[in-house]
Image: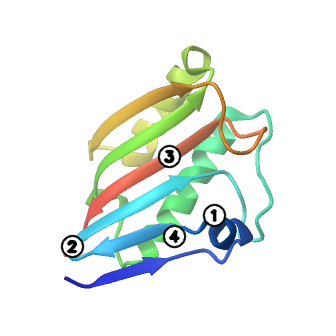
């Protein structure tokens, strides 16, 4: 089996020692995506919906690198600070993002995430051809 990894070139990838995604055969495992631009600047402090949309945009960047679309995603895991407050927004944006495609989903409420202003992190698994 061959492996290939992908990173955005962010400093924290090297510091922490991980890839944004790792392809193992037809399986693509995507690390938790955050709300940041391609210069590493955080986007959407205090704006949960913008953070979710930006995390999905970063997921799209990863998928595009592997010539895939969100329709190849078979599962997501979302980590959410203050889950009860933000669940309805997450559900709505998730439905908008995936449309009629319905991957599996796990949502976990957490006390904290890596960045103090971070409210959500979204990981995914996709099957490629």
Q: Earlier in the sequence, mark 3 or mark 4?
A: 4
Q: Residues within 10 Å of mark 4 (few under 14, many from 20)?
A: some
The total of numbered circles placed on residues is 4
Q: Is residue 68 left or right of residue 56?
A: left
**Quarter containing the C terminus:** bottom left
Q: Is residue 22 left or right of residue 43?
A: left
Of 129 and 4, nearer the camera is 4
**Quarter containing the N terminus:** bottom left
How far is mark 1 from mark 2, CA to CA?
26 Å
Residue 103, how many percent across, how many down? 27, 44
Secondary element under disc 3, as helix, strand or loop, is strand
Q: Residues within 10 Å of mark 2 (few under 14, many from 20)?
A: few
Q: Residue at 40% across / 37% down in the picture?
A: 95
Circle 3 is placed at which residue position? 122
Please state which of the two labelled residues, at mark 3 or mark 1, is closer to the viewer. 1
Q: Is residue 112 left or right of residue 127?
A: right
Residue 6, how many percent across, how many down? 49, 77
Please state which of the two labelled residues, at mark 4 or mark 2, is closer to the viewer. 4
Q: Residues within 10 Å of mark 3 (few under 14, many from 20)?
A: many
Q: Residue at 68% across / 42% down in the picture?
A: 50
Give the number of the disc on residue 26: 2
How far is mark 3 from mark 1, CA to CA?
18 Å
Of 9 and 87, nearer the camera is 9
* Picture quadrant where residue 111 is located: top right
Secondary element under disc 2, as helix, strand or loop, is loop
Circle 4 is placed at which residue position? 19
Give the number of the disc on residue 16: 1
Of 96 and 16, nearer the camera is 16
Please state which of the two labelled residues, at mark 1 or mark 2, is closer to the viewer. 1
Q: Are marks 3 and 1 in contact (CB under 8 Å)?
A: no
């Amino acid at each position: 089996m061959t492996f290939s990894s992908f990173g955005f070139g962010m400093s924290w990838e090297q510091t922490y020692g991980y890839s944004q995604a790792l392809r193992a055969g037809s399986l693509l495992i995507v690390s938790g995506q955050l709300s940041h631009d391609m210069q590493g600047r955080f986007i959407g402090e205090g704006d949960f919906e913008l953070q979710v949309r930006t995390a999905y945009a970063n997921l799209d960047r990863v998928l595009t690198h592997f010539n895939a679309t969100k329709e190849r995603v078979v599962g997501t895991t979302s980590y959410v600070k203050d889950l009860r407050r933000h669940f309805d927004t997450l559900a709505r944006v998730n439905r908008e993002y995936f449309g009629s495609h319905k991957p599996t989903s796990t949502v976990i409420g957490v006390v904290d995430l890596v960045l103090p202003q971070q409210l959500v992190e979204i990981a995914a698994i996709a099957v490629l051809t």
